[in-house]
Image: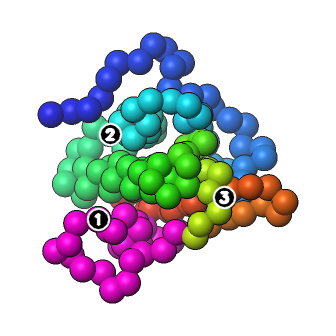
Amino acid sequence: MSTTRQHPPGGLGREPDGKGAASAVPSDRQWRSLSLRQASGIVPMARDFARQALYDWGWLPADGADRRAAAEDVLLVVSELVTNACLHADGPEELRIARSDKALRVEVVDRGAGQPAPRTPHRAGRPGGHGMFIVQRLCLDWGVTRTPDTPGKTVWAELAAPE
């Protein structure tokens, strides 16, 4: 069963100009962002937004198992980062997604002071605590960017583009 909902044209966020991004990334990326402030149904909305970007950028519909797995990995990482911001950082402020020829970058901006980290030791059979472990396993790299004298942070993750 799909969680995709129909949104009005232009209702899934804006195409930012790439200026003022919270982290240093190449300028050749195509960016999309979605404000999550005071939204309801944040995780499904973030997944829908990411899914639409993947369609627009040609990752979906996937024409093979590897491409389908790459798209599903992106949607899972979006879900995990947004859920972590909901649970541990007073909610997400914004979701940003960028693509280049070689990678896709997901950023979640929140106002929390905490530092996300995979729970150690990881216990696969226990409920909860798997989010950052999943992100670490699926991504090429991930991290946290903070701006001095500004509350909050940007948690980012990069995934390889499908071949």
What's under tag 3, amino acid-wise? Lys
Labels 3 and 1 touching (C-beta < 8 A): no
Horizontal and vertical percent for residue 154? 63, 57
What's under tag 2, amino acid-wise? Leu
Q: Which residue is mark 3?
A: 153
Looking at the figure, which quarter contains the N terminus?
top left
Q: Is residue 150 left or right of residue 77?
A: right
Hey, which quadrant is residue 96 in on the image?
Answer: top right
Nearest the camera: 89 or 141?
89
Most common secondary structure along the magenta stretch: loop
Give above or below for 56 relative to 92.
above
CA distance separating discs 2 and 1:
30 Å
Q: Which residue is mark 1?
A: 128
Tell me how many marks there are: 3
Q: Secondary structure at mark 1?
A: loop
Nearest the camera: 82 or 27?
82
Give above or below for 19 relative to 35.
below
* First to last magenta residue range: 116-142
Give above or below for 143 relative to 28.
below
Q: Earlier in the sequence, mark 3 or mark 2?
A: 2
Examine the rendering and report whether any part of residue 102 can be seen. no
> What's the residue at 49%, 14% (across, down)?
9
Q: Nearer the viewer, mark 2 or mark 1?
A: 1
Give above or below for 18 relative to 5.
below
Pointer 3 local density, CA inside 10 Å: few below 14, some 14–19, many at least 20? many
Horizontal and vertical percent for residue 116? 52, 69
Q: Which residue is mark 2?
A: 60
